[in-house]
Image (cartoon, grey):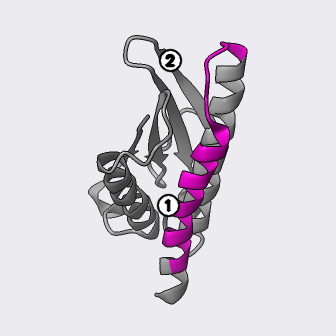
């Protein structure tokens, strides 16, 4: 149905960092896709990228599921971004991998709950969003 992407940053110093720019790029393109109705029918996915700094980090590593809201038909995820990725040229690729992992995890969850989830169309949309991002990163 839709995709929502947000950033939880421990510091304003992260603004305009490679990871901030990579996430913002994908989020902006996802918002355009949302407005144009290009996401598959079915549940909404919502992911928060939780950035790490030398002073502060999320209380987990990797990705965790934040729960499913039946009424809103939304599955929530949080992804802990390692501090070394925040300033890395690999940030766009990292974001692409997290997005793909989120879709795979959503499919597994919805299969267990016997809820329809169009994995093929979700992968297609995520590929389009992240291909544009990684292409932009290569040209800059």
The residue to which callout 2 is attached is 68
Density class for disc 2 (Cα within 10 Å; few <14, some 14-19, many ≥20) is: some
Q: Is residue 97 left or right of residue 52?
A: right
Q: Is residue 36 magenta?
A: no
Q: Which residues are magenta?
A: 112-135
- The answer to whether residue 93 is left or right of residue 72 is right
Q: Residue at coordinates 43% horizontally, 48% vertically from top-left?
A: 38
Does the segment drawn in magenta span residue 133? Answer: yes
Disc nearer the start of the sequence (1/2): 2
Whole-angstrom CA distance, mark 1 to mark 2, is: 24 Å
| Residue at point 51%, 36% (across, down) | 78
The x, y position of residue 123, in whole percent, is 63, 49
Looking at the image, can residue 115 be seen?
yes
Residue drawn 39% across the image and 61% down it: 20
Image spot of residue 93 (x, y percent):
61, 66
The kind of secondary structure element at disc 1 is helix
In terms of secondary structure, where does tag 2 sit? Answer: strand
**Is residue 61 in sight in this rendering?**
no
Pick out the residue farthest to the bottom: 139
Image quarter hosting the N terminus: top left
Residue under the point 33% across and 58% down: 28
Q: Residues within 10 Å of mark 1 (few under 14, many from 20)?
A: many
Vertical placement of 89 versus 116: above or below? below
Instruction: Establish if 121 lies above or below 69.
Output: below
Q: Position of residue 29 (x, y in %)?
A: 38, 59
Mark nearest the camera among 1 and 2 is 1
- Numbered label attached to residue 129: 1
């Amino acid at each position: 149905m839709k995709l929502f992407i947000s950033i939880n940053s421990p510091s304003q110093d992260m603004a305009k960092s490679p990871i901030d720019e990579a996430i913002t790029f994908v989020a902006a393109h996802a918002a355009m896709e949302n407005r144009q109705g290009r996401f598959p029918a079915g549940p909404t996915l919502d992911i928060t990228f939780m950035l790490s700094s030398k002073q502060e980090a999320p209380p987990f590593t990797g990705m965790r599921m934040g729960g499913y809201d039946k009424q809103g038909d939304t599955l929530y995820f949080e992804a802990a971004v390692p501090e070394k990725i925040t300033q890395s040229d690999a940030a766009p690729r990292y974001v692409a991998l997290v997005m793909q992992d989120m879709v795979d995890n959503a499919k597994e969850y919805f299969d267990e709950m016997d809820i329809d989830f169009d994995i093929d169309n979700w992968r297609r949309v995520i590929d389009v969003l992240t291909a544009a991002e990684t292409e932009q990163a290569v040209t800059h």
